[in-house]
Image (cartoon, coloured by chain):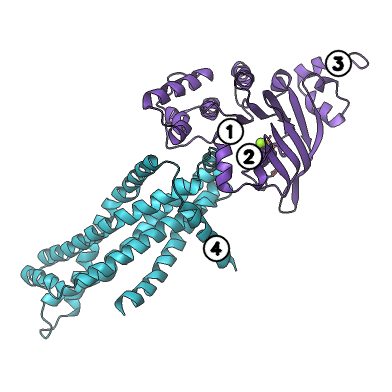
Chain colours: A cyan, B purple
Amino acid sequence: MKFLFHFGRYLSLLRLAFQRPEKQSIYFRQIMVEMENLGLASVGIVAIISVFMGAVLAIQMAFNIDTPLIPSYTIGFVTRQSVELEFAPTIISLILAGKVGSRIASEIGTMRVTEQIDALEIMGINPATFLILPKIVASMIINPFLIMMSMLLAVGGGWLAGIFTGLFPSSEYIYGIQSFFHMYDIFYALTKTIVFAFIIASVSAYNGYYTKGGALEVGEASTNGVVYSSIAIIFMNLILTQILLA
Amino acid sequence: MIEGRNISKSFGDRLVLENVSVSMEKGQTNLIIGQSGMGKTVLLKCLVGLLEADHGKVFYDDREFSKMSFNEMKEIRQEIGMLFQGGALFDSLTVEENVMFPITMFTKQTPQEKLERANFCLSRVNLQNVNKLYPSELSGGMKKRVAIARAISMNPRYLFCDEPNSGLDPQTAHLIDELIKEITIEYNMTTVVVTHDMNSVLEIGEKIYFLYQGKLWWEGTKDNILYTENPELQAFVFTSELTKRLRPVKGVGG
Ligand SMILES: Nc1ncnc2c1ncn2[C@@H]1O[C@H](COP(=O)(O)OP(=O)(O)OP(=O)(O)O)[C@@H](O)[C@H]1O
Ligand SMILES: [Mg+2]
């Protein structure tokens, strides 16, 4: 019951958000601002996590296939595949749900409890369009770039791991990451990324938008934003994988 | 003129407004007064449509506001200026950007024109040299004044002020009262002010509505409020030392 109530209200908020903005030029400026706030500000954390995860993946792989029957370029191949299919689009999106989602939910939640959203409404501005739409659009534009950067850095991290540990030869790894490459996998990853970006921005905005109370509730909304967008991401991941890889 | 007819509003099973009817005249300062928690802000929010009344209707110059869709309301709202009790300034914008915000959204004025208008509005609330500060860098009273400047930046036809001079020193409070009275007459606005400041009541109370326990308990003007026989209103009016001294002697006057 509760789920249905929230889901219904979420859909009607989306309908409210996807309306013609009052002033186009301002709206485009908002998108730029949000791309900076939500995207550029996440480059650092995405980079660090990607390099280390790539390194760990490669090292684990090296220990696991410690048999001469499997060629060692497999390490590069498997690292690339896991990064490309799952690790970059899904795990990094989950990280972004934590970072960006809490930011969106608390920003909008604070505006709600301090009546800034009412102030927008009273001026004759549709607050849902003004606040939420630029965040959704900005995330859907910038997240694919973050994810592609993550792929490159993670694969690079694996290569560095080989150099520093000496577990596998650099040339084999480089050969591995180039073998059996399918463009469709990138399409699959980016489709997931864009859907997840939509989920992160809209679900956390929803949680902020209906905040009631004060600072305590804003904190709660922020946590809920992260939790629910993460759950929605995991769930959609299953569905999209079924649809796109079937 | 803004009219609220038979407005009732409850939150859960708590009845906050019960069958309240008010009529806010054009070119006048109309006051809603009452103790803290008596539903003044709720009434104001019902009038501007931020809260939906359970019963009752709201009219803006004979246009039935309460049955309009969100998009129809938007048109009327562009003619509304509102000061929220807490200011509701946009945290992410500077003082000057806050005041210019409605102008930017709804007009095609050049940056120069907008800035001039913002500076004019800020000077009317006696604020100088704060243009580039953010709301978090202002004192409570300064925030309030910036919010007033923003509310009047578009020359609204309807002005709503929720406690415009709470948290201000007596001189600034007086200045704000004067400003509200002045622009109401100058632009023939319909102005609604929520207050529990007796100074303001006696200064700008051309029409006064007194709320008590969710009901409209008394209505009148600044000229007859001191002569009221209503015990609850008397208790409200004659609490402070200053107003006690204004209390008419029984049998004299009014
Ligand atoms: N959103 C809400 N949800 C539940 N109850 C509310 C809500 N808004 C107001 N109330 C209740 O309605 C009553 C009237 O509140 P209101 O804010 O109108 O008081 P007020 O007259 O403006 O007081 P003050 O002078 O302190 O601002 C209060 O008892 C308050 O608890
Ligand atoms: Mg109030």
Depicted A36 relative to depicted B202: above or below: below
Q: What residue would you read off at disc 4?
A: A8
Ligand 1 within 8 Å of disc 4? The answer is no
Given the image, what chain letter belongs to the residue carrying mark 1?
Answer: B
The tally of labels here is 4
At horizontal 36% and vertical 53% (from top left) the residue drawn is A137
Under 8 Å from ligand 1: the CB of mark 3? no
The residue singled out by tag 1 in the image is B82
| Chain hosting mark 3 | B
Pointer 2 or 3: first along the chain: 2
Picture quadrant of ligand 1: top right
Residue that protrudes farthest toward the right in the picture: B251
How much space separates mark 4 and mark 2, taking CA atoms?
Answer: 26 Å
**Nearest to N terminus: mark 2 or mark 1:** 2
Q: Amino acid at mark 2?
A: Val
Residue B248 disc label: 3
Q: Residues within 10 Å of mark 1 (few under 14, many from 20)?
A: many
Instruction: Name the mark nearer the viewer: 4 or 3.
Output: 4
Write down the quadrant of residue A46 in the picture: bottom left
Q: Residue furthest bottom?
A: A69
Q: In this rendering, do the residues under marks 1 and 4 share a single chain?
A: no
Q: Measuring from the top left, give residue A226's x and y in whole percent.
A: 44, 58
Question: In terms of secondary structure, where does tag 2 sit?
Answer: helix
**In the image, what residue occupies the spot 31% across and 61% down?**
A92
Left or right of A97, for residue A119 = right
* Pair 1/3: label in front: 1
The reply to the same-chain question for discs 2 and 1 is yes
Identify which amino acid the numbered label 3 is placed on: Pro
Callout 3: SS: loop
Residue under label 2 = B48
